[in-house]
Image: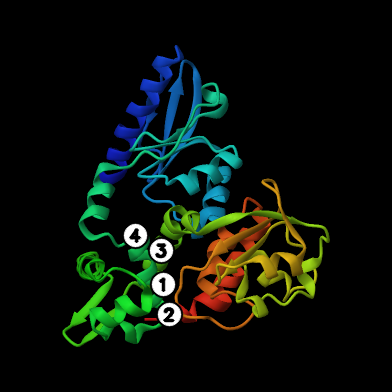
Amino acid sequence: MLDNNKQQILIKTLNHLNQQMTGMDRPVFQVKDTASGKDYVVLMQNNVRSVACIQAWAPQQNFSALLQRLRAMHAGLLLADFINPVMAEKLKQQAIHFVDKAGNMYLGSLCDGVFVKGNKDPRLVHQVQKGRVFNPAGIRLLYAFLNSPALLNASYRVIAKKVGVALGSIGPVMANLQHAGYLYDQGKQKKLINKKRLFERWVDAYLEKLRPKQFIGRYQSTKPDWWKAFDVAQFEAQWGGEIVIARQTPFMLPENTSVYMQMDDMDDFLQASQLQMDADGDVTLYRAFWLNKETGQNVNSMIVYADLLDSVDPANWEVAKTFYGGAITDFLQE
C-alpha cells in the first residue's frame, strides 16, 4: 500500500494529468490497483494498462538510478512531488513521461508532446521565501560553508564580505538551515549536519537558480582539442565539468567544455584560445560566483560534480557517480 505522502502525490498529479487529457479530448486515466507496491500504481486508460512510479523527490544525484528503476518496472509515467526545470529537461531528453504536484509535466506520445515546466509548488515557494536557503545568495553561502566550515562561526559582517552577499541575507539563511535540520547551533559552535542531503539539494538549486545567472555565452574553437595544452589559470579562469575528468582520463573525449572566468576582461583569453561566439558552440563560459581567487586549473569539486550531472550524456552520470565516491564522499563526512 502507498503511504499517506505518496497517496497525496497520486491524487494531485492524477488530477493535473486528467485535466490535461480532458482538455485535449483524450481518455482519462483511472487507478486500477494501488496495492501492488509501495512506490507504484497500475493505471488504466480505456483498456490500456500502464504502470506509474511514484517518487517523493528526485534529486540530480540519483538520476541514473531513477532511470534504471523506471525501466526495470516498465513504468510509463513518473508521478512526483516536484520536478524542477533542470530535471524536467533531463527527463524529457530521455523520453520519460512525468507529472508533478505543481502541474509540471511531459506527456510526449501520451498527449501531443505536452511539456510544462517552471510551475512552483506553493509549499516549496513558501519555504524559499521564509528562509531563502536555496535562492542565489543562499546557494553562495552554502558553497562557502561546505568548503570552509569555520566560516559558520564568523560574524555576519565577515561572512558577508568573504562570500559577497548582503548582510541581511545571512540571518534568514541560518535560521532556515537550523529549522530544516541542517545546522547544529550551540552558540559559538555551529556546524552543518545531514550534509549529504543538503549537498543534493544544493546541486539542484545551483543548476536551476545560480549557474544560469553566471552564463556569459557559448563559443566554438577552431581546434577541437585546444583545451589539452591550454593554460586557463594564466587568465584567472578554471576548467569545469567534463574537461576536468578528460584531463585526468585519456580515454574520455568531452562533448562540452565549460570554463569559469574570474575576470571581466576576456579579450586576452578569447584571443589566446581562438574562441569565437557561436550560439551552438560546445564551449560555455560562466562567470565565477566565488570572490576568493581559487588557484589551479580546475574548479572546486562541487562545481565539477554539478556540471557532470547536468550533462545529457548518460555516460557522464556514471562518471559523476565515480567522482562522487572519490572526491565528494570524504568532503561530506559529518
Disc 3 element: helix
The numbered mark at residue 147 is 2
Direction top: furthest residue:
25
Where does the image place residue 132, in percent across and percent down from the top left? 27, 59
Residue, x 36% and y 38% (percent of image)?
Answer: 119
Q: CA distance from mark 2 to mark 4?
A: 17 Å
Residue tagged 4: 134
- Mark 1 burial class by Cα count in 10 Å: few <14, some 14-19, many 20+: many
Q: CA distance from mark 3 to mark 1?
A: 8 Å
Give the color scheme: rainbow, by chain, secondary structure or one colour. Answer: rainbow
Residue tagged 1: 143
Q: Quadrant of the C terminus?
A: bottom left
The kind of residue on which mark 3 rests is Trp
Q: CA distance from mark 3 to mark 4?
A: 7 Å
Disc 2 element: helix
Q: Quadrant of the N terminus?
A: top left
Residue 149 lies, with reference to residue 13, above or below; the image says below
Where does the image place residue 5, in percent across and percent down from the top left? 27, 45
Tell whether label 2 touches label 1 (CB within 8 Å). Answer: yes
